[in-house]
């Protein structure tokens, strides 16, 4: 299965086409195709996961990876040498692998994994170390996608722990969302279309996570963006929805500028290849100039900011809640928005070296993550729409992930991605379950006291919340603790202190805003629509996914229990063991890369801070303690509240000032310039020519040219008769003049040049 | 079969339409159906020839001139009838013979006013001769004749069958292009006289042969002269593309032209200019090309942003699409200006992709006009509700046009941006990297105006004006004409090698006199 992973994205892609073709004619409107395809994908993804675990447990001998890189480098050198010597960096590793090159190239083209057919002379020194440090190389399989400029560009699949994990996460959540949706969007005006897009999204996302090169990542990245656009704007009859869809797409396009530039820089820096393994390896080995890595990292960071909702390009994500709720769970919480995080993880060699993560104490990635997790956490307080609370919470949690990667905690970040996918999907679907009858997400106006009437939704929501606020021993607890431990211990000279503080403070915010949400939704009196509706628990197609996800949210953390706790050693760090890549394409080989250790104080203090947040919010909302109404009485508090309500003013800046400016005055100005200056000039030239021409014709050119003009004029007149009278005669006259002029000029030029 | 094509393939593709046109002229005006059938059969026959050429083309030797025919034409000046096809011209020939039948199918029940199928179809067929001829000609003078031949039918098509301001638009189109051509002929003549004589049947003579001239590649020519000559080509081809600031004929021509005219204009005519750069100007005058490249690149990226801003300011759907061509051709020209094989491959891909995608957009705009009798964006809305299939196709085409990966447009755009990072030797690298960033920013604008168009036209609900009107969704002819284009946009997007494989060898060969391509 590891070498045939390409089948996995193909299935939902076919499902997409099939649903479009025949979906409407089927009894369940095409949802059966989507569900079946994603279920098959899930099974195949599990097979990949199991296959990968087997591979880690019994790794084949290493060496294929080095060959792969050598082959890619050699291939490009070869093709470049054929065309011309290149001024770029490719020449730098010319000496390295020439002997091996041809050899390796054969291995690449043959088929199957490179790891399987290693030979003894392969670079086995990594594998020779302690038993625990076995190198398990990824399984890469690729074919030529196209060739350009003599360079072959491949498309392929790369299976390692990271992609295997993503396969399982994406297919699992997608499958549950499919099940949930069959009930939730039943009777929708575009039911078939909805499922078609879900399939397309699943296919694109799987294509993205399997990518073995950056170009393929761009393709997947944009395609998931397309699906996001389509699904946010699912109810496009209403303008706010299509506005939100446009905003999402355009904001992501802004980030894509960085993506395109970053990928291009890396392409050339690595000697004309998109191959991620090669790029990472060269970055780790110091073959790429640090400056280039830094610029590439910064560019790619912009893309991460837009896709993964980091400050200041996060504003589209809360608006994206205009889409159907299961979509929010799948795309805007569990999978698509982590694409940026995934990209960092995939190109970690680039970022780790570019930002000097292993030796620094502050870098753009960590800062962006930290600012995001705090900034979004604060915004979650002023929302009255439960989906928006969850959306800002997602932004905040994505901040944690980015921060984790920024401080060097690769496993911590990815582990959090994994646990977050489970508990946040659980929460979003829970919100959908709550709103299913009342069609409103306004928890202040239309909810309250729902815990008794919707017990299953309540309990699963509580479990999801517990995981989100990192309640001890839930999944979120383990992953968040690891992020904080990473901030405390990694990096050079005393760790990323600022990140540790931000992360700990964020725990309090998370606890508090979720307590607030729980109060509004489940406690107190039923208000508004929920008071007038006959509220009852939803059917199994909605509750079963919730229960599955909540079980995951509760226990998934045990996949990566740190060492040094009461648990037996064999249970610990399984996630790290299986998911974290080994080998030259991952910075794990570098001396500056380290793993954090469990620190009881970090765990205790952050948990205490989180609980404090919960306690304060509990007192404020449940017990009505504290200075209520302070925003009316106190200027500072009111100002702060206003800033949050206006979302730091970013929406106004983007929508009104930037977008509005371009759509309005700037575009109009440019067009005015076009019509009046450029075109005015053209018309002026034309009319001058016409007058001059008439004058010349009348006064000078009676002799030679006259006949030509008359002749062509007559001919044109004739053809004009056939069709319709036009100004042909004149045109012909101009034509004749122009050619005469041309002949004169040509003669001049020839005389001058010779 | 192969032998027959070898001798007659390109010639047949060029002159069959002319034969068809002659037959049309012989049929009385009242026999409308017969006219349509004859025109369609002719264009399909040309298409079959094109398929034959595609099938017998030797893809492993795409750099080699294949199906070469070299016959005496104008003996006195040694201008010869040389036609041949290599990897650069093949995709564009294929595009032409592919699009023309679709346009004729679309026309079936959609003839523009004044209703005159005979004249209209004749014009289309004459156009086809000119277009195919331009792409197969390997003699500069022959090329020029075909290049100019295209002008007339298009002039009549706009001037007779166009919208309200057809006279202004057609005249502007004609004069502007003729002006460029005039400068081009200067350069052609200069090239002719300044290149060394070659041995033709034992006599040393000057030559117009593009093959010979490309081999010569301006060696021994003073740099200043090369720059001047290139300048003439630049004007001729640049206006045709059109490049900023010579683009103002385009929105007028497009807006006024009948739908079919717009489609052909966008799909093929604009490519004559870019093709000229790739086929003639750069291989023959590499030194001039290196001097002009930064100017071309600069104008190209200005065009990208400027065209996009122009789009944002439009209130008319068709004019918006017309302006988008300025931006899109900017990417093509950026790719060309890098003088790298990567960039020029991307440019050729971009030409084909733009032809299909923008052609599709013009088809859609024409159909909207047909049904709503207006293209004013303000008055439209909710197309997806009234004509869902057309609405989705509009969404599809907009996505393709904004360069969504997986569809053809992406492969013209991204590689062109990429190539600007590392232009050929002798070009200013920081400058081109700046161009790269500007071009990348341009993709945001492209998404902006296209999605905004989509939102206003397709999303939402119909305006009061058309609320109760019954709008007919796609006709049979629409299905027939559009589905091949849609399929091709997807197929090329998923497997770009179909095109890159053809062009790559030929492009590399054409750049052999440029260092660091």
Image (cartoon, coloured by chain):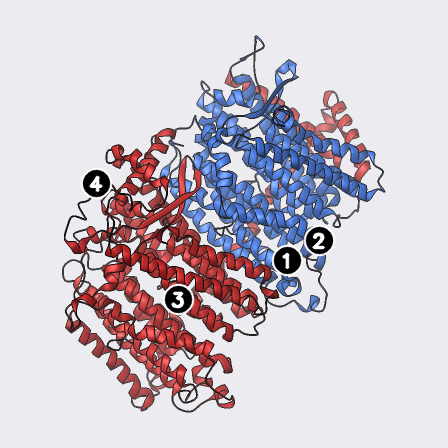
Q: Chain of mark 3?
A: A
Q: How far apart are the alpha carbons under marks 3 and 1?
A: 35 Å
Q: How far apart are the alpha carbons under marks 1 and 2?
A: 13 Å
Residues at marks 3 and 1 on the same chain: no
Does label 3 or label 4 sit earlier along the sequence? 4
Q: Which mark is residue B476?
A: 2
Instruction: Look at the picture and state if B143 lies above or below A375.
Output: above
Which percent across, then down, holds residue A296?
A: 32, 49
Q: How far apart are the alpha carbons under marks 4 and 1?
A: 61 Å
Of the 4 image quadrants, the one containing the N terminus of chain A is bottom left
Along the horizontal axis of the image, is A115 left or right of A746? left
Q: Which residue is mark 1?
A: B390
Q: Which mark is residue A172?
A: 3
Q: Residues within 10 Å of mark 4 (few under 14, many from 20)?
A: few
Does label 1 or label 2 sit earlier along the sequence? 1
Front-most of residues A638 and A183 = A183
Between disc 1 and disc 2, the foreground one is 2
Q: Residue at x 22, y 56 (%)?
A: A357
Q: Which mark is residue A293?
A: none
Between disc 3 and disc 4, the foreground one is 4
Q: Which residue is mark 4?
A: A120
Q: Residues within 10 Å of mark 1 (few under 14, many from 20)?
A: many
Between disc 2 and disc 4, the foreground one is 4
| Secondary element at image label 1 | helix
Along the horizontal axis of the image, is A640 left or right of B339? left
Q: Colour of chain B?
A: blue
Instruction: Look at the picture and state if A686 lies above or below B461.
Output: above
User: Do callouts 1 and 2 mark residues in contact (Cβ within 8 Å)?
Assistant: no
């Amino acid at each position: 299965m590891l070498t045939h992973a390409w089948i996995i994205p193909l299935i939902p892609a076919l499902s997409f086409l099939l649903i479009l073709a025949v979906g409407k004619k089927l009894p369940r409107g095409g949802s059966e195709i989507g569900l079946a395809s994603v279920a098959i994908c899930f099974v195949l993804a599990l097979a990949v996961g199991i296959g990968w675990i087997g591979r880690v447990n019994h790794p084949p001998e290493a060496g294929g990876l080095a060959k792969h890189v050598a082959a890619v480098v050699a291939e490009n050198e070869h093709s470049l040498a054929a065309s011309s010597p290149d001024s770029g960096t490719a020449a730098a590793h010319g000496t390295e692998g020439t002997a091996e090159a041809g050899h390796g190239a054969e291995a690449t083209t043959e088929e199957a994994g490179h790891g399987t057919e290693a030979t003894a002379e392969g670079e086995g020194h990594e594998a020779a170390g302690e038993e625990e440090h076995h190198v398990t190389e990824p399984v890469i399989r690729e074919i030529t996608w196209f060739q350009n400029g003599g360079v072959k560009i491949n498309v392929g699949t790369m299976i390692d722990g990271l992609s295997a994990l993503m396969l399982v996460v994406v297919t699992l959540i997608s499958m549950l969302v499919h099940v949930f949706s069959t009930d939730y969007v039943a009777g929708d005006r575009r039911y078939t279309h909805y499922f078609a897009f879900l399939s397309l999204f699943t296919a694109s996302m799987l294509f993205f996570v399997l990518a073995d090169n950056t170009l393929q990542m761009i393709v997947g990245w944009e395609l998931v963006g397309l699906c996001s656009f389509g699904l946010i704007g699912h109810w496009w009859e209403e303008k706010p929805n299509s506005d939100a869809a446009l905003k999402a797409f355009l904001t992501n396009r802004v980030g894509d500028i960085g993506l395109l530039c970053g990928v291009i820089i890396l392409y050339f820096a690595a000697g004309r290849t998109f191959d991620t393994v090669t790029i990472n390896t060269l970055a780790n080995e110091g073959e790429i100039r640090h400056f280039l890595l830094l610029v590439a990292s910064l560019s790619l960071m912009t893309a991460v900011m837009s896709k993964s909702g980091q400050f200041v390009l996060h504003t589209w994500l809360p608006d994206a809640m205009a889409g159907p709720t299961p979509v929010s769970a799948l795309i805007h919480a569990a999978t698509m928005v982590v694409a940026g995080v995934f990209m960092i993880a995939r190109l970690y060699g680039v970022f780790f070296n570019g930002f000097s993560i292993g030796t620094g104490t502050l870098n753009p990635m960590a800062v962006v993550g930290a600012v995001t997790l705090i900034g979004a956490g604060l915004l979650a307080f002023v929302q009255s729409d439960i989906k928006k609370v969850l959306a800002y919470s997602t932004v905040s949690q994505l901040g944690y992930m980015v921060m984790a990667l920024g401080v060097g905690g690769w496993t911590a970040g990815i582990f959090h991605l994994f646990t977050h996918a489970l508990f946040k999907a659980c929460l979003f679907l829970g919100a959908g379950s709550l709103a299913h009858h009342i069609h409103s997400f306004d928890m202040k106006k239309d909810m309250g006291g729902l815990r008794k009437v919707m017990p299953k939704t309540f309990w699963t929501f509580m479990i999801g919340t517990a995981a989100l606020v990192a309640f001890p021993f839930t999944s979120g607890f383990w992953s968040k603790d690891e992020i904080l431990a990473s901030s405390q211990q990694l990096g050079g000279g005393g760790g990323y202190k600022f990140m540790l503080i931000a992360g700990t403070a964020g725990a309090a915010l998370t606890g508090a805003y979720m307590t607030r949400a729980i109060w509004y939704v489940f406690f107190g009196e039923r208000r508004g629509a929920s008071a007038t509706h006959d509220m009852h628990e939803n059917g199994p197609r909605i509750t079963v996914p919730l229960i599955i996800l909540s079980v995951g949210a509760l226990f998934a953390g045990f996949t990566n229990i740190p060492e040094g706790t009461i648990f037996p050693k064999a249970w610990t760090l399984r996630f790290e063991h299986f998911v974290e890549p080994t080998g030259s394409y991952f910075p794990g080989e570098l001396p500056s890369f380290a793993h954090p250790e469990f620190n009881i104080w970090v765990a205790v203090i952050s948990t205490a801070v989180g609980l404090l947040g919960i306690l304060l919010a509990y007192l404020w909302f449940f017990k009505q303690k504290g200075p209520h109404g302070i925003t009316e009485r106190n200027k500072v508090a009111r100002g702060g509240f206003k800033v949050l309500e206006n979302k730091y003013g970013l929406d106004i800046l983007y929508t009104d000032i930037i977008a509005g400016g371009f759509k309005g005055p700037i575009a109009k100005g440019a067009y005015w310039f076009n019509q009046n200056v450029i075109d005015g000039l053209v018309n002026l030239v034309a009319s001058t020519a016409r007058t001059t021409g008439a004058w010349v014709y009348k006064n000078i050119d009676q002799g030679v040219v006259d006949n030509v003009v008359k002749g062509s004029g007559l001919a044109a007149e004739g053809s004009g008769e056939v069709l319709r009278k036009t100004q042909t005669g004149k045109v012909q006259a101009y034509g004749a003049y122009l050619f005469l002029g041309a002949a004169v000029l040509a003669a001049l030029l020839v005389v001058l040049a010779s | 079969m192969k032998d027959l094509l070898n001798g007659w393939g390109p010639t047949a593709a060029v002159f069959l339409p002319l034969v068809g046109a002659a037959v049309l002229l012989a049929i009385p005006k009242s026999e409308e159906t017969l006219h349509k059938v004859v025109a369609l059969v002719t264009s399909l026959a040309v298409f079959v020839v094109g398929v034959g050429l595609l099938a017998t083309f030797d893809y492993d030797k795409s750099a080699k001139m294949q199906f070469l025919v070299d016959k005496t034409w104008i003996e006195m000046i040694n201008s010869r009838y040389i036609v041949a096809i290599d990897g650069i011209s093949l995709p564009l020939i294929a595009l032409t013979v592919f699009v023309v039948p679709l346009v004729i199918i679309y026309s079936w029940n959609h003839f523009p006013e004044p209703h005159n199928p005979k004249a209209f179809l004749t014009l289309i067929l004459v156009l086809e001769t000119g277009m195919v001829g331009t792409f197969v000609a390997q003699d500069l003078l022959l090329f020029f004749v075909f290049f100019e031949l295209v002008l007339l039918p298009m002039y009549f098509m706009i001037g007779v069958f166009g919208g309200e301001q057809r006279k202004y638009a057609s005249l502007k189109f004609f004069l502007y292009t003729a002006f460029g051509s005039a400068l081009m002929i200067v350069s052609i003549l200069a090239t002719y006289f300044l290149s060394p004589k070659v041995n033709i049947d034992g006599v040393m003579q000057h030559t117009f042969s593009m093959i010979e001239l490309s081999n010569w590649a301006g060696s021994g020519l003073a740099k200043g002269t090369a720059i001047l000559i290139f300048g003439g080509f630049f004007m001729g081809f640049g206006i045709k593309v059109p490049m900023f600031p010579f683009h103002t004929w385009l929105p007028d021509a497009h807006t006024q032209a009948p739908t079919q005219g717009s489609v052909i204009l966008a799909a093929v005519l604009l490519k004559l200019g870019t093709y000229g750069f790739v086929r003639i100007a750069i291989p023959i005058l590499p030194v001039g090309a290196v001097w002009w490249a930064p100017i071309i690149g600069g104008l190209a990226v200005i065009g990208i942003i400027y065209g996009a801003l122009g789009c944002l300011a439009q209130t008319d759907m068709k004019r918006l699409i017309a302006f988008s061509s300025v931006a899109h051709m900017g990417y093509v020209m950026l790719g060309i200006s890098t003088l790298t094989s990567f960039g020029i491959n991307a440019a050729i891909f971009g030409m084909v992709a733009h032809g299909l995608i923008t052609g599709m957009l013009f088809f859609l705009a024409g159909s909207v006009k047909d049904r709503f009798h207006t293209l004013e964006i303000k008055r439209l809305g909710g197309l997806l509700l009234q004509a869902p299939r057309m609405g989705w196709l509009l969404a599809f085409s907009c996505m393709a046009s904004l360069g969504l990966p997986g569809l053809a447009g992406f492969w013209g755009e991204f590689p062109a941006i990429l190539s600007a990072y590392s232009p050929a030797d002798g070009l200013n690298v920081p400058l081109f990297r700046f161009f790269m960033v500007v071009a990348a920013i341009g993709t945001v604008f492209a998404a902006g105006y296209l999605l905004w168009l989509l939102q206003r036209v397709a999303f939402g609900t119909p305006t009061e004006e058309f609320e109760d009107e019954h709008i007919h969704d796609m006709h049979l002819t629409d299905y027939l004409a559009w589905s091949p284009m849609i399929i091709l946009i997807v197929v090329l997007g998923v497997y770009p090698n179909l095109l890159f494989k053809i062009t790559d060898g030929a492009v590399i060969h054409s750049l052999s006199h440029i260092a660091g391509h």
